[in-house]
């Protein structure tokens, strides 16, 4: 079962960011400082080469996961009750006004 790996350039294009920003995200992820929408995230990727300094490869499923984390999920606004124009106030047992 062969997996189609994406290069850093392809991954950045899929995410809609520059390659330098993508590398910055990977560096932040390695340090544990990367957050999307206030939630701490880690990016799983592969790096080839003898000492791990080779080309970056990332799975398409990981890009899809990151895109879902960036998705804005709006919430419905809670409705407020209309103010009442009542002359009766709860907890007040005496008539309101200036004392005569």
Image (cartoon, rainbow, N blue to C red):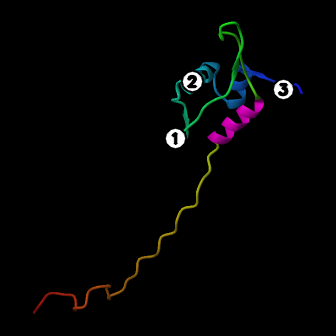
Q: Is residue 67 above or below residue 46?
A: below
- Indicate yes or no whether the magenta region holds residue 62: yes
Q: State the image coordinates of residue 8 (x, y, percent, origin top left).
A: 70, 20
Residue 38, numbered circle: 1
Residue found 32% across the figure and 88% down from its top: 87
Report the side of 96 relative to 19 (left or right): left
Of residues 87 and 13, the one drawn nearer to the viewer in this rendering = 13
Report which quarter residue 66 is drawn in: top right
Q: State the image coordinates of residue 20 (x, y, percent, origin top left).
A: 60, 18
Q: State the image coordinates of residue 63 (x, y, percent, origin top left).
A: 71, 32
Residue found 76% across the figure and 34% down from its top: 61
- Measured in 3D between alpha carbons, the distance from the residue under mark 1 to the one under mark 3, in whole angstroms, is 31 Å
Residue 3, numbered circle: 3
Number of numbered tags placed on the structure image: 3
Residue at the spot of label 2 = 30
- Indicate yes or no whether the magenta region holds residue 44: no
Q: Which structural element holds mark 1? A: loop
- Magenta-highlighted residues: 60-70
Which of labels 1 and 3 is toward the front?
3
């Amino acid at each position: 079962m062969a997996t189609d790996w994406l290069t850093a350039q392809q991954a950045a294009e899929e995410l809609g960011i520059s390659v330098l920003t993508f590398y910055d995200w990977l560096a932040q992820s390695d340090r544990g400082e990367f957050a999307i929408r206030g939630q701490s995230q880690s990016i799983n990727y592969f790096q080839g080469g003898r000492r791990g300094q080779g080309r970056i490869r990332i799975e398409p499923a990981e890009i899809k996961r990151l895109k879902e984390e960036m998705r804005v999920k709006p919430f419905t606004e809670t409705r407020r009750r209309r103010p009442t124009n009542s002359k009766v106030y709860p907890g007040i047992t005496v008539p309101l006004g200036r004392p005569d």
